[in-house]
Structures are given as C-alpha cells and as structure tokens.
Image (cartoon, rainbow, N blue to C red):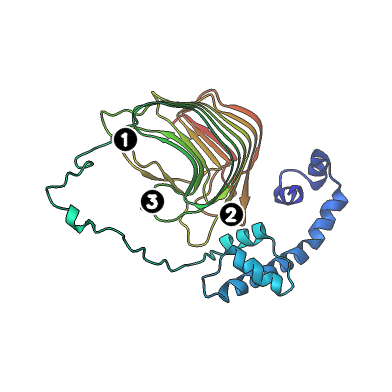
Amino acid sequence: MIFSFIKEQENYSVVKWAEFFEVSTSGYYTWERERAERLERDRKYREEVREAFNSGKGTYGVDRVCGIMRRTGMKANFLKVKRLMDEMDLHSIHKRRRQRSLTDSRKSRGDGYENLVRDLEITEPFGDFRNILVDSCVITNSNRGLGIQLRDSGNVEHVRYTNIHIETRRFSNKWWGHAEPIYVTSLDRSAGKGAGRIRDVYFGGIVCNGSNGAYISGQKDRPVEDVVFDNVSVEMKARPGEDRGECDRRPCIGEGLVRRDSAGIYCADAKNVTLRHVRVTWDGAPAEGFGAALEVVGSEGLKIEDFTGRASRKGIKAIIRRQA
C-alpha cells in the first residue's frame, strides 16, 4: 500500500512522497490515525482464526476454518484466512490410510527377474530446453518458487514466467532451496562436466513474499544472459525460528551453502540483466541476515528502469555493486 510505503521512508518528507504518488497528505494522516484500530482488528481476527483451527485439534484446513468462522457470524475470506494461517504456521495434519497392495512383489525380487534400472546413471539432460511458457500460477508454502537450476550440459533459452504469485519459506537444510522465490543458476556440478548456458528469461507480473530474495548466478566464462524482471515485487519477512543470511548453490563445485546477507535481488556473473518496474520491501522490524535491496557482483550490462527499494537496516547500502 502506498501509505505503508511512505511511512517507511526517512529520506524525504511526507509532502514530497504524497506529491510523487499523487495522494493527499490528509489521507495519509487519516490512515495513520486509524492504523491502531486496524491493527487491533487484525489481532482479534487472528485470534478467531487460531481458535477455529485449534477446535479441530490440528486437523482443520482453510476451508473448514472458514466454515466454522462463518457459522459464528464472522466474515471469512478464503485467501485472507489462508495467508494468516501460513503466517502463524497453522497447517492441518491428516492421518493417511495405508493403501493395500493388490499385488505381491516379494516373489519378484530374485536374480531371475531383471531390474531394468539397475546400474542406470542419468548424469545430464538429453538436450536443450527452449520456448517454455509458465503463466497464471500460485505457489504457496514452498522452499523455492520458480527455478532454473542448470548443472549439466544442455542449454535453457526463451523462457517466460508471467502473472505468478509466490510465497516461500525455509524448511530443512537437507532440501535444496532456501526460500528463494526466483532462482536462476548455471553452475558446474562436478569437475570435467560443465554446465550449459541460460539465455533470454523473462519474469513479468511476479509477486514474491518470503524469507529470501531472488537469486541469479552464472559463471565467469558462462554468464546467465538476457534476464528481464518486469513489474516484479519482492517482499521479504523474517519468520521466527528460520535461519537467515545464507544462499543455497547446491549442487555445485565448492561451497554449496554460502553465508552472506540476503539481498532482495542478488545477481552474480550475469550479462544484460534488465530491472523494469521492480520493487523490494521488507516486512517487519530490521533483521540480521537481511542486506541490500539489490546486490550485483561481477556482472555487466545491467539496465535499471524504475527500481524502488531500500536496505533492510541502517549501515547497509540500498544497492551494492562490486566486481567479485
């Protein structure tokens, strides 16, 4: 929301920001006066959601919670209830019935039965990936959102992601992915097996919410090329109990988990990256492990057309550029 954004800014006055966004200062101050009431209503609504969820002893999902709230006379919007349940880590637990097998495979385990996949090793893609379109998707409660993870020969090019909402969170270090909503990497898996190239990837109309930022990384001799962020927003939030300040490059040669402050958008060893109408925001109080809005390392041809963002906390630059 515009008023929320204005409240976070310290470099210019409210009047300047109001003129920029073409809103009234009186509207801003009215919003600020009513903010306490809205926060109190939100707190009570969260309590109602939690109470409805707890009435099912952890087995109720979003639909059931909405139904219980409506029966008590409350309004229950599915998307709002789902968002609050995700924020409060309220996830239903269902006991799964064991599926009874209709066949007995114990007699098929002897040496007389050929195993068609024994000693079969797939080490690399069988060809290139081209002309891919992903449109109108919702990704929720995932350890990674949109990912192009190239580790072997074969190239990826002409890929379009449009109109997608992404919500990510950290899970276990055993899983690849540290809540990156957008992840584009071309890294060698092992010595002697070089990764291919990634070219011409477009992200348009993407909304990202999670505990990590977008991550782009190629290699000095094979940079990721021609990536466009068009109308992309990244909102980062520190979740209680989640580790921060770490990027996941696995699998790769060398260090897979690298400790560093997470930027809203991180770009390393890339060429001709365009950021058009891109916004980075931080939800909540300043948190350790979060860094700049944009960090660019060893990349050339960066083009910025309307980028909005500030550092996560004082003492850090909003945009960091360095060679290595």
Q: Quadrant of residue 97?
A: bottom left
Q: Secondary structure at mark 3?
A: loop
Q: Nearer the viewer, residue 115 or 223?
A: 115
Q: Are marks 2 and 1 in contact (CB under 8 Å)?
A: no
In space, the residues marked 2 and 1 are separated at their CA atoms by 36 Å
Q: Residue at x 73, y 70 (%)?
A: 74
Q: Residue at x 33, y 38 (%)?
A: 252
Q: Give how far across and how far down residue 45 sits, in percent.
A: 69, 68
**Residue type at tag 3:** Trp
The tag on residue 175 is: 3
Residue mark closest to the camera, 2 vs 3 = 3
Q: Nearer the viewer, residue 68 or 214?
A: 68
Q: In the image, is residue 282 above or below residue 252?
A: below
For label 1, the residue is 189
In space, the residues marked 1 and 3 are separated at their CA atoms by 17 Å
Q: Earlier in the sequence, mark 1 or mark 3?
A: 3
**Residue type at tag 1:** Arg
Q: Does residue 270 appear to the left or right of 249 in the view shown?
A: right
**Residue type at tag 2:** Pro
Q: Nearer the viewer, residue 106 or 148?
A: 106
Q: Give how far across and how far down residue 245 sits, in percent.
A: 46, 49
Q: Residue at x 65, y 57 (%)?
A: 79
For label 2, the residue is 286
Residue mark closest to the camera, 2 vs 1 = 1
Q: Earlier in the sequence, mark 2 or mark 1?
A: 1
In space, the residues marked 2 and 3 are separated at their CA atoms by 27 Å
The tag on residue 145 is: none
Q: In the image, is residue 216 above or below residue 154?
A: below
Q: Quadrant of residue 221?
A: top left
Q: Earlier in the sequence, mark 2 or mark 3?
A: 3
Q: Secondary structure at mark 2?
A: loop
**Mark 1 crowd level (few <14, some 14–19, many ≥20, 10 Å Cα):** many
